[in-house]
Amino acid sequence: MTEDNKPFVKIIIAAHKKYQMPQDPMYLPVHVGAAGKLGKDGEPLDIGYVKDNTGQNISDKNSEFSELTGLYWAWKNVDAANLGLVHYRRHFSFRKKSSDPFENVLTSKEASRLLHQYKVIVPKKRNYVIETLYSHYAHTHYAEHLDITRKIIAQKYPDYVQDFDQVMEHREGYMFNMFIMRRDLVDAYCQWLFDILFELEKQIGPKTAKMDNFQKRLYGRVSEIAFNVWLRHEVRTGVLKASDIKEVRCIYMEPIDWGRKISSFIKAKFFGQKYDKSF
């Protein structure tokens, strides 16, 4: 706890179904997309987690915004000195202690120690090797999403355009919409991000009717890249120093089908086959 009795750090875990969760009180499982979900009895679905359709929320946008409905809910409704977002199948891990992935999840003690040294915790960068962030998105999804996002940034936040252009040329980036940050940074990021995404929704929204359910989740994917744009700008303008940012390992709670993942990556790049599901 801080001197004003706020939690020092609170990390929400975005989940759409019941799943094993870390027992550390630092974590707050959130049922994302709770709006309108009914159980077999016809009553509102209750999976035992805080619902993202309480307080100020955008829960009804979950089918297109994915875990961002959880981030928005936390931004508006959770009061903590540091705030983070992870996923039920992906967590931060400071060190490997066991073959059981849940024994390796970042603890409140580890997070507190890190946050007294750093202002931002992010997963280690994902390297696409033969793709830039822009080309990978264009091959697996639709380049138009990023092109329109750039136009919106140029209109609303022109000082970020050079950062956007630089990030698009990178072959690696902080992905998964995972981070832990000081509260004022979360406020600044979310204000910037959702202002852009809500405008993107106005401009591209009608086209989602022709997309499959996987491709409709475009706002969550655009935000993965947008986070890199925002972070680069904050460092470039001196709001943050590179030394304020700490990369921490991301671990998966389920096995990864690397064969299918690599095959889909190659098919998208060389044969124009868009992704149709998560891996």
Image: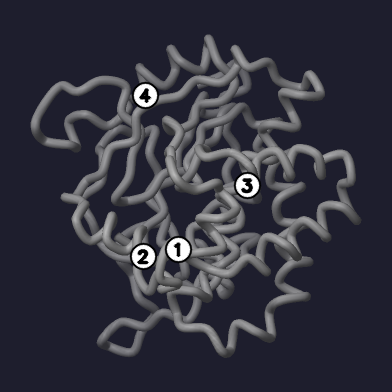
Type of residue at label 4? Answer: Ser
Of residues 171 and 220, the one drawn nearer to the viewer in this rendering: 171
**Label 2 packing within 10 angstroms: few (<14), some (14-19), many (20+):** many
The residue located at (35%, 66%) in the rendering is 267
Residue 241's image quarter? top right
Q: Amino acid at mark 2?
A: His
Q: Compute the Cα span from label 3 to label 1.
A: 14 Å
Work out how far the residue at label 4 is from the one at label 1, CA to CA, in angstroms: 23 Å
Pointer 1 residue: 32
Gap between marks 3 and 2 measured at Cα: 19 Å
Q: Are marks 1 and 2 in contact (CB under 8 Å)?
A: yes
Q: Position of residue 232 (x, y in %)?
A: 69, 31
Which of pointers 4 and 1 lies earlier in the amino acid sequence?
Answer: 1
Instruction: Identify residue type, mark 3.
Output: Trp
Q: Are marks 2 and 4 in contact (CB under 8 Å)?
A: no
Tell me if mark 1 has few (under 14), some (14-19) or many (20+) residues whose alpha carbon lies within 10 angstroms of its own. Answer: many
Crowd rating for badge 3 (residues with CA inside 10 Å; few <14, some 14–19, many 20+): many
- Residue nearest the observer in this picture, 228 or 193: 228
Left or right, 77 with respect to 196, comes to left
Q: Position of residue 216 (x, y in %)?
A: 53, 75
Instruction: Point out which mark residue 243 bears.
Output: none
Residue 75 is tagged as: 3
Residue at the spot of label 4: 108
Name the N-terminal-most of marks 3 and 4. 3
